[in-house]
Image (spheres, grey):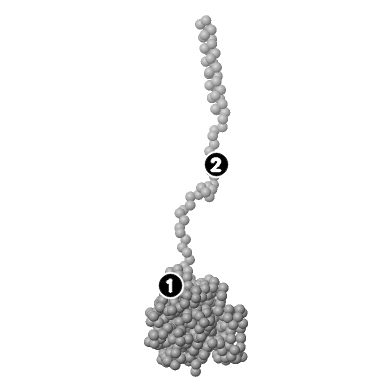
Amino acid sequence: MRHYRFTRLMVVLVVMILAALALTLAACQQPAPTQAPEQEPTKAMEQKPAEQPQEEAPAEEITLAIEHFSIIEGTTWSGAHDRAGKRIAEKYPNVKYIYREEVGPDSTVPFAEELISEGADIVVGNAEFMGLPLLDITDKYPDVIFGSVIASDLTTKPNFVRFFPRQYQALYLEGLVAAALTKTGNIGVVSAFPSVQVIRRQAGFTLGVLDGAELLNKDVNIYVKYVGDWYNPTEEREIAKTLIDQYNVDVLTQQSDSGSPLDVATEAGIWFVGKDMDIVGEYGWSSTDTVAISFDTRWEVLYDRMVQAKLEGNPPETILYLGMESTFTLADGTVEPTVDIMNDGKVGVDAISPKAEVPQEIKDLVAQRREQMMKGEWDPFTAHAFVSNGTGLDLEGNPVPEKGKEVKPAGEEPSVEWLLSQFNFDLEGVTILE
């Protein structure tokens, strides 16, 4: 029994030893572990240095230069152009505005070359008679954009822009208000001189007066007397007094540039309708006790087209005739159309003096037409027929049509070229005084 247990124990030990030897031999036969080959780091594995913020290329700096035909202070025309230059510079940090005042035709080119030497990229004459001489140097400075306000000439070059706002749209709205204001039925216009530009603007006012008078069932007369110049304070004053004293005018407006007609209206205690700027809100001239409404011209809408062309390196549009449907956004975010009615900082119907006795139906029509023009859905020059008054300015090959002749039917849109260069007759309903 003891021998049997010993034998069994020996067998177990031998088995265990053989098993251990087998495991050792198996381990010895396995290949030694190898090191994995080094791999090229993938893009995702690469450690990138921290990215440095890229500096934006500096915006191109350009200079807008305006040559003003008159002084700036105390004028609505050059004052509005000067304000436009300042607003452009305020909107764009990379745009500088420089100017010259009281520039005549003989000094246009010398001043322009002086401005170009100061860095001007855009040079503009703010009246046609002193802006056209810029044509003489457009080829000499092909990289400069030149421009001139249009009176009736439409000459252009690839770098010579002609421009004007559709002021007649706002003048039409003023005419509606003027028709409502007059109690004598007599409205007076102190005007510069017969020209396509002047006649066209007076036509917008006339159509508004006639529409307002028809709506209110009034008989209204419009008297126009010419100064012979844009800026002649003494003569403008005398004409304003004549209109009041001799023609019983109780609403006065102007197509001239000094503040004299407004002074006379204030002294006489009659209503005044302003032009080119919000004269109460901008200059503090008189008050809404006298100024019933003004129209405000935002030349910056047109100048911005030239600035953008220069910044983008594109050829400029050479004829710009923009109206209430075109806008410019000021530095403070205010969106303004090319022209609008204003008074004491207010716009639209709210601009009508709170002391003006304007019936609601006129206010409603003003609001309706203004909105339609801002949307480009209606225009007084398209909607109305043009019937000649028999007065105006004979042009070469284009005499003034005889009185009573319908030159354009209602509903037909006149071309830009015709409005800017051929509209040479007063509309029926106006009396031109000698």
| Horizontal side of residue 406 vs 147, given as left or right | right
Q: Can residue 259 be spotted in the picture?
A: no
Q: Earlier in the sequence, mark 2 or mark 1?
A: 2
Give amino acid for label 2.
Pro
The answer to whether the residues at label 2 and label 1 have Cβ atoms under 8 Å apart is no
- Which residue is located at x 52 percent, y 5 percent? 1
Please tell me whether mark 2 sits on a helix, a strand or a loop. Answer: loop
Extreme-top residue of the structure: 1
Indicate which disc residue 37 carries: 2
Q: Can residue 221 be spotted in the picture?
A: yes
Extreme-bottom residue of the structure: 434
Q: Position of residue 417 (x, y in %)?
A: 59, 82
Query: Dividing the picture into quarters, in which one does residue 73 lie?
Result: bottom left
**How many angstroms separate mark 2 from mark 1 (CA)?**
65 Å
Give amino acid for label 1.
Glu
- Which residue is located at x 53 percent, y 47 percent? 41
- Which residue is located at x 51 percent, y 75 percent? 365
Please tell me whether mark 1 sits on a helix, a strand or a loop. Answer: helix
Q: Position of residue 63 (x, y in %)?
A: 46, 76
Q: Which residue position holds label 1?
A: 90
